[in-house]
Amino acid sequence: MKLRGIKQRWMFNCMLVTVLAVLAGVMAFSVSRANYYYSGIRSGMESKARTAADFFANYVTRTYAEYYQSAYRYTELFDGRDRMELQFINTQGRIVVSTYGLTAGTSPGTDDISGAIETKSLKSWTGRNPATGERITAVSSPVLYSNGQVAGVMRYVTSLRLADRQLLLNVLLALGVGAGVVLLVFLLSTIFIRSIVTPVQEVTVMTRRIADGGYGSQIENKYRDEIGEMVDSINEMSIQISQSEKMKAEFISSVSHELRTPLTAIAGWSETLSYDDGMSEESKKGLENIIEEAKRLTNMVEELLDFTRIEDGRFTVSIEKLDIEAELEDAIFAYRELFKQKGITLEHIPSEEPLPIIPGDPERLKQVFLNVLDNAAKHGGSGKRITVMIDLSRDHEGGGKDYVRIRVRDYGPGIPPDELPHVKYKFYKGSSKARGSGIGLAVCEEIVRLHSGVLNIENAEGGGTVVTILLPVSNNP
């Protein structure tokens, strides 16, 4: 079992140690109580057996008849019959006299009897009565003639039923106490771990908000320990990042505005000079390069300005009714000849059914189409083919709305799987060596989002990359 959360790991480890410790304690207590009860019973019976055997030996001289008569009288006078059974056993192991007359004539056959006869010393035994199956403890002491020969065995037998019951009650009590300890530890652990996990979860939520762009967000610090120090550090980090992001946005905006004027002048004079018939062919080629690079830089500046507008919340769209297929065809027309010059075939697959007029910003959506087509050429142009498809996607993913779906697929190498989740991040370029600022897709996603649409990027089956743009047919929820 793999435990991921702090709470799960803490509770598992803490409760495992507690349960094992409680079980060990209950087992140790049970063993000690068992030794106390059973050893006490056995020791008392052994002491009584020694005293009785020494006293009884005074009545036994040399004959079995004397042994039998003395045994009979002793059992008649035995006053402990309510607690135990007194038996006199002959050398063949058979009971000849007993305080419980029913056992007379039987042979218990336990080891304590044979051991006492063979070793002429006291022996004890604990186990189940062969006749009844009841748990008993027996102590056997040999009775000797005056010449040292064994006349028989004096045997004390007692039931362990009451001792077993008392021991069971003690074990159950110990288990109850142990369960109470486990429950107490569980409750205390729950309170303690909650005091750790709750602030950590609050900090995690806020750090995710900061990671998602909520720079400057602050966590209320209610703690005066290491967690409080961590909260202070995160709050300080959030402020520093917010200030850094603000400075970055201001710098990009300032530089972008400063670049617009000279770029406009470069583009304008380049266009004017291109009409000079006296210019050499080599100079015209150089001028074409200047015009192309000026356009690329202008597009980059516009992307940077869009980025700063997104960052400070000034990025907006002007929604109107538009023919989305016509807007897409305009973008395809703008790039088809350029792609042809690069050896790339741009294939357009129109919708098989008439598409409805949808709400949208024509300029912003055209910006999305051009950017996606440009990326397809830059990153997947090695496949020499780009396919653009448009159709109607009804009730996309069960959302209850109809969408116009635009798919742009290239047949290049595709995107490395580990980079795919990050390609829409601002300034992310991954392993690509293509020129660009790395914010075009981020701007496109923001435009699509403002249209209540979805922009997905994934690797196509069979190779290449496919960009899917979903625009709702209606802006009603």
Image (tube, rainbow, N blue to C red):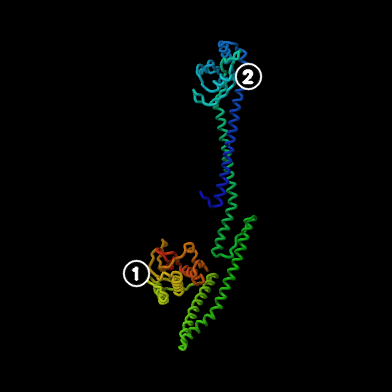
Q: Position of residue 134 (x, y in %)?
A: 51, 26
Q: Residue at x 62, y 20 (%)?
A: 50
Three-letter amino acid code at the position of disc 1: Glu
Find the distance from the CA under tag 1 to the CA under tag 2.
Answer: 115 Å
* Percent of width and height locating residue 387: 39, 70
Q: Quick check: 10 left or right of 344?
A: right
Q: Is residue 186 above or below residue 110?
A: below
Task: Find disc 1 in the rendering and name its residue.
Answer: 352
- Check disc 1: other Cα within 10 Å, few if <14, some if 14-19, many if 20+: few
- Vertical placement of residue 75 versus 396, above or below: above
| Amino acid type, residue under disc 2 in the picture | Thr
Residue 344 appears in which quarter of the rendering? bottom left
In percent of width and height, residue 396 lies at: 41, 63
Q: Is residue 437 left or right of residue 468?
A: right
Camera-nearest residue between 41 and 266 = 266
Residue 3 versus residue 202: which sits nearer the camera?
3
Q: Which residue is mark 2?
A: 51
Q: Is residue 218 visible?
A: yes
Identify the residue at image location x=53%, y=15%: 96
Asked if residue 440 lies left or right of residue 241, the reply is left
Q: What residue is rendered at 55% in x and 49% in y? A: 9
Q: Dividing the image into 4 quarters, which one contains the C terminus?
A: bottom left
Indicate the position of residue 241 as horizontal and vertical percent values.
59, 66
Q: Secondary structure at mark 2?
A: helix
As helix, strand or loop, the secondary structure at mark 1 comes to loop
**Counting other residues with Cα less than 10 Å from the Cα at mark 2, is it few (<14), some (14-19), or many (20 or more)?**
few
244 above or below 71? below
